[in-house]
Amino acid sequence: MSPRNFLRFVCKIPHKSRYKKLVPKIVNGGIAGIIGVTVVFPLDLVKTRLQNQQTGPNGERMYSSMLDCFRKTYKAEGYFGMYRGSGVNILLITPEKAIKLAANDFFRHQLSPGPGKALPLEREMMAGAGAGFCQIVITTPMELLKIQMQDAGRVAAAAKAAGKTVPKISATSLTLELLKTKGILGLYRGTTATMLRDVSFSVVYFPLFARLNALGPRKSDGSGEAVFWCSFLSGCVAGSTAALFVNPFDVVKTRLQVINKAAGERTYSGVGDAITQTLKHEGVTAFFKGGACRMIVIAPLFGIAQTVYYLGVAEKLLGYSK
């Protein structure tokens, strides 16, 4: 049975009629995720390196700004160097979106006050939190592997400056090594920080998007859906706002998940230790490193997602009426 026929079969199961609209949503989310990763990954790589760099004893830094990081990375590693770790994201982005969208839909249904009644804000936040919590099953190992690949160039550059060399790594070799030495739990390093980031993001994003989207004009076809530009802007604004809000958790998560650090860089024993040491040595502003990059990354990601949903790409692939 082909994937297309399988998806159609799942959608036609009578007792799962409530999820019929969810399957195209998941497919659209996966397509949007793959396109989004391809488009914005270089910025995400820059964000990771900015978040990981630590200020030296005399205030020295490897990268002075987002543009400086982009320029140095491109010069040292070339165009494809900007896409280190993208394969992991592309491979796992669809199941991550599937879990997040399905979980949010499930929790919203379970928390619904009844047919035709709007979901109260606190229940929207609870549904978003539940979705964010469920997605860490995929997000944590995906982020762990991606960060090692993204930060490898920075670590190698620091080692080269110190007259040393570091062995090259790949996502496959790293996965096998972690499984061999630490088992499946080795892939879940930084789970607490990932949970703090993803749950907080979903708590902010889903209710904010719903409220912003409800403010705009509706389509003239009687569907009650917002016009495209309203959903597009709502997704960009809600995504960017949530991204900035949770950036401190993202910084902590990124630093905890780095396995190979540059010589002399601090190590952390957990979320509390990472927060304490970062505050002590770098101040509050360190928690917003890469914040601008993250906002710039998130906005087009949700813009692309809204475009894919608006065009009904999955519906066309599955042969459904939109």
Image (tube, rainbow, N blue to C red):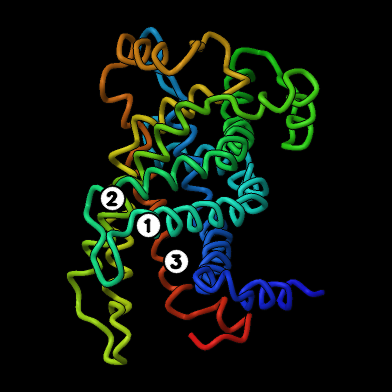
Q: Which of pointers 1 and 2 lies earlier in the amino acid sequence?
A: 1
Q: Of 4 and 252, which appears nearest the observer? A: 4
| Left or right: residue 274 compared with residue 221 | right
As drawn, the label of residue 108 is 1
Query: What amino acid is found at the position of numbered circle 1 in the picture?
Result: Arg
Q: Nearer the viewer, residue 52 or 270?
A: 270
Callout 1–callout 2 Cβ contact below 8 Å: yes
Q: Which mark is first along the chain, 1 or 3?
A: 1
Label 1: state its secondary structure.
helix
Q: Quadrant of residue 309?
A: bottom left
- Which dot, 3 or 1, sits closer to the camera? 1
Res 78 seen here: no
Q: Looking at the image, do the residues carrying marks 3 and 1 touch, with CB atoms under 8 Å apart? A: no
Mark 2: amino acid: Arg
Quadrant of the image for the N terminus? bottom right
Residue drawn at point x = 57 percent, y = 31 percent? 151
Residue 10 in picture, x, y percent from top left? 66, 71
Which residue lies at the image location 51% right of the left edge and 58% below the top edge?
A: 102
Residue lying at 36% horizontally and 57% vertically, measured from the top left: 299
- Which element type, helix, strand or loop, lies under badge 3? helix
Disc ID at residue 304: 3
Residue visible at 64% across and 74% down in the picture? 13
**Numbered circle sitting on residue 123:** 2
Number of residues whose C-alpha sits closer than 10 Å to that of mark 1, classed few (under 14), some (14–19) or many (20 or more): many
**Could you tell me the amino acid type at mark 3?**
Ile
Q: How many C-alpha atoms fall within 10 Å of the one at disc 2: few (<14), some, or many (≥20)? A: some
Rendering quarter of residue 272:
top left
Q: What is the distance, in whole Å, between disc 3 and disc 1 at their CAs?
A: 24 Å
Q: Mark 2, mark 3: which one is toward the viewer?
A: 2
